[in-house]
Amino acid sequence: MQTVFITGTDTDAGKTYVSRLLLTGFAAQNIPAIGLKPIAAGVDGDGKNADAKILQALSAIALPYDLVNPLLLQAPVAPHLAAANEGIELDLSVLDQQLAETATLPASIRLIEGAGGWLLPINEQLYLADWVIQQQLPVILVVGMKLGCLNHAMLTARELQRSGVPVLGWVANVIDPTMLLLDDNIKDLTQRLPWPRLAVLPFQSDAPVQIALQLADAVLHSLR
Ligand SMILES: Nc1ncnc2c1ncn2[C@@H]1O[C@H](COP(=O)(O)OP(=O)(O)OP(=O)(O)O)[C@@H](O)[C@H]1O
Ligand SMILES: C[C@H](N)[C@H](N)CCCCCC(=O)O
Ligand SMILES: [Mg+2]
């Protein structure tokens, strides 16, 4: 089983959007894949997190909700702050356990969606990035294309490079359909970022399966 960690330049950059496309693209090629959301903040009326439910529903294996999302905070805010308010400890050993419990499942690919951006605080000392670095998980960076993303992308890239974590590539995900000079911004980032651009995802709520297939292929190629 190969594992990929999906990070983004910010919350709402499109990590779930990209994960959804990847799980769809793998499924279309009969590649069994699962999606995990170890830390989620914010719940629907059913008490579950929307991202985690999407990943659970698109996983090739029926997984219990708690295995997809073992750490769930009620409020849609920074998880460590929600945890403090809710009297919960964000314990990274829970993520180790999730990795161990999913390692032997009959899946070829395991996607792990982060929360927020790369330096998501866990507590006063730790960031979610520290766990990814410790596990040496290959990372995909989703850049939410909007004004300001050049700075967000390059800050994230510097920190990824400093950490020594393997980076498979980045995705230009258009989240602002009104962005001026979109092509120039994508070209600029393509020159600046030291990793392959895996895809450019246009702004569209329902991406055609062709886009999902192309993205999945690019990721499979990067894993070879
Ligand atoms: N390419 C796109 N075209 C249209 N809408 C998009 C696109 N990418 C993302 N969105 C929408 O933008 C919103 C934020 O995207 P998404 O939920 O994937 O962000 P995220 O990085 O997973 O955020 P979080 O940190 O909360 O997990 C969602 O409503 C999503 O459907
Ligand atoms: C609730 C939201 N959708 C995300 N899941 C959590 C975003 C945390 C951002 C923390 C921060 O960097 O300020
Ligand atoms: Mg998400």
Image (cartoon, rainbow, N blue to C red):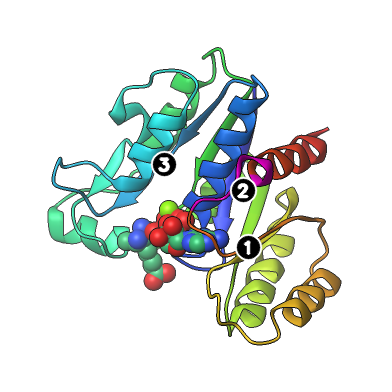
The image shows residue 139, relative to residue 66, as above or below, that is below
- Identified at 82% across, 56% down, the residue is 196
Residue occupied by mark 1 = 202
Amino acid under disc 3:
Lys
SS under mark 3: loop
Looking at the image, residue 150 sits to the left or right of residue 175; the answer is right
Disc 3 within 8 angstroms of ligand 3 (CB):
yes
The stretch of residues the image draws in magenta is 206-211
Looking at the image, residue 168 sits to the left or right of residue 103; the answer is right
- Identified at 42% across, 27% down, the residue is 97
Amino acid under disc 2:
Ile
- Identified at 26% across, 45% down, the residue is 72
Residue occupied by mark 2 = 133
Q: Nearer the viewer, residue 172 or 9?
A: 172
Residue occupied by mark 3 = 37
Q: Earlier in the sequence, mark 3 or mark 2?
A: 3
Q: What is the C-alpha distance between the residues marked 3 and 1?
A: 24 Å
The image shows residue 105, relative to residue 64, as above or below, that is above
Q: Earlier in the sequence, mark 1 or mark 2?
A: 2
Mark 2 neighbour density, 10 Å: few (under 14) some (14–19) many (20 or more) = some
SS under mark 1: loop
SS under mark 2: helix
Q: What is the C-alpha distance between the residues marked 1 and 2?
A: 30 Å
Q: What is the C-alpha distance between the residues marked 3 and 2?
A: 17 Å
Looking at the image, residue 182 sits to the left or right of residue 36; the answer is right
The image shows residue 68, relative to residue 163, as above or below, that is above
Disc 1 within 8 angstroms of ligand 1 (CB):
yes
Q: Position of residue 61 (x, y in %)?
A: 46, 18
Q: In the rendered image, is residue 150 in sight?
A: yes
In the rendered structure, does residue 178 fall within the stretch colored magenta? no
